[in-house]
Image (cartoon, rainbow, N blue to C red):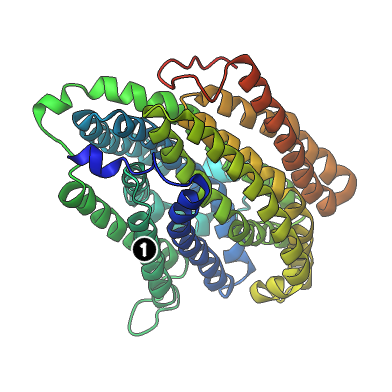
Amino acid sequence: MLVNRHAKLTTGPVGRSLIRLTLPMVMGLFGMVAFNVVDTYFVAQLGTRQLAAMSFTFPVVMFVGGIALGLGVGAASVISRAIGEGDTQKVRRLTTHGLVLSIFIVVLFVTAGLFSIDPLFRLLGATPGVLPLIREYMTIWYVGMVFVVVPMVGNNAIRAAGDAKYPGFMMVVGASINVILDPLLIFGLLGFPRLELRGAALATVFARATTLLGTLAILHFRERMLDFSSAALRHMCDSCKRILFIAVPAAGTRILTPLSMAVITRLAAGYGPGAVAAVGTGTRVQAFALLVVAALCSILVPFIGQNSGAGRTDRAELARHWANRFSFVWGLFCLVVFLVVARGVARLFSDDPQVVRNIVLYLSIVPIGFGLQGISMVISAALNAVNRPLSAAALNLVRMFALYVPLTFVGSRWFAMEGLFGGVALANVLAGIISLLWMRRICKKQDFRTTSPELLNDRI
């Protein structure tokens, strides 16, 4: 039976199970982040103007990624709980409807995105000399957006079934294709046309299209988790409500990441294109440090979801504690590593002394907050898994608007780039402390360990 085959996260040692599931995701995310860094490296060879143009696109690309991840979290949460409950038809229905919903949302965003490129990037501080380059890249990227969003939702459904290996494998395959195509299309090697920034966008679209085909094939032929019958489609509205109840707040919290990127990019723009280029490079390199925690959080949702659905909330609570401790230790380790390698990494991306200096500043200051930032990520994932998305969203809103925006603004005004990056680090430290205190309050108010997830009220 499909559910019995998939419900494999409710037994075995918790720590060992999380490590086993996280490792394939680390490899997949490593591939994606490596592609982003390599992509940035190739574009940097075109010049500072091209690198600045691509850096301006990061907040928008991350915004769309936040929408996709939010939909994926919503789908993974409801699907994993359905698997834990043992309801095969519900699993198939929710998976199918999650994919259909993602396509509908893509159509809306593509339409809005194509008509808002110029005003949006002017708002972010793009200059007339950079704006045409941004337009070249984003027009192609928007058209291929379906290949970015739908695979994320599909891979989350596969992870909800307890398989982390295939999504990780497909992420590596997609990243590898992207890395191969990048130099061919950007520089016009081996007979390909020299497309520069347009080539970088096309390489991304082609690579993501490959992952879409692979993901749909696995869901349909191996996992048997799709059902496009008229009977299943009649329950579309109910499924969408369940998914969106988790997805909307989850997407909202993930949108705060590109929003924070937009804030820091806008503040850095006041110091010139070199500062923007340094911020874009620094954030991409930073992703290497956080990908292990991100992989762990992506696994926590189906792990806690399946165990909550099966009534094993003791295992769900133990998983959260284990993930908190690991994330903090990992953050401290990454801080030490970046302090050692910051200058060498900066010189890989630019020979401009000002850009190098700002990258070194970023990689020496921002990682101070990694440990507690990881704890914030873990607590947010745990809350989404047990049907408390509003609590998770509230924590991230506090981080963004009560901490991140004012601290980076004041820091940049008083201490220039050092203050800007210091504001980022301090915001993450304070957000982690608040998240821990908030979770303790929730557990005292309503026992996280013993309350059925179907009966949880999402009161903040």
Name the image quarter holding residue 262.
top right
Count up the numbered dots.
1
Residue 413 in view, yes or no:
yes
Residue designated by label 1: 174
Residue nearer the viewer, 201 or 331: 331
Work out which residue is located at the far right of the displayed protein and give it.
414
Residue 446, placed above or below residue 339: above
Going 36% across and 46% down the picture, which residue do you hit?
159
- Horizontal and vertical percent position of residue 91: 25, 33
Quadrant (top left/top right/bottom left/bottom right) for the C terminus:
top right
Work out which residue is located at the far left of the displayed protein and give it.
230
Name the image quarter holding residue 183.
bottom left
Q: Amino acid at mark 1?
A: Gly
Going 36% across and 57% down the picture, which residue do you hit?
165
Going 67% across and 21% down the picture, which residue do you hit?
441
Residue 1, placed above or below residue 18: above
Residue 117 in view, yes or no:
no
Element under disc 1: helix
- Horizontal and vertical percent position of residue 87: 23, 28
Going 67% across and 42% down the picture, which residue do you hit?
263
In this picture, residue 382 sits left or right of residue 178 = right
In this picture, residue 341 sits left or right of residue 75 = right
- Horizontal and vertical percent position of residue 442: 62, 21
- How busy is the neighbourhood of tag 1: few (under 14 within 10 Å), some, or many (20 plus)? many
Residue nearer the viewer, 179 or 3: 3
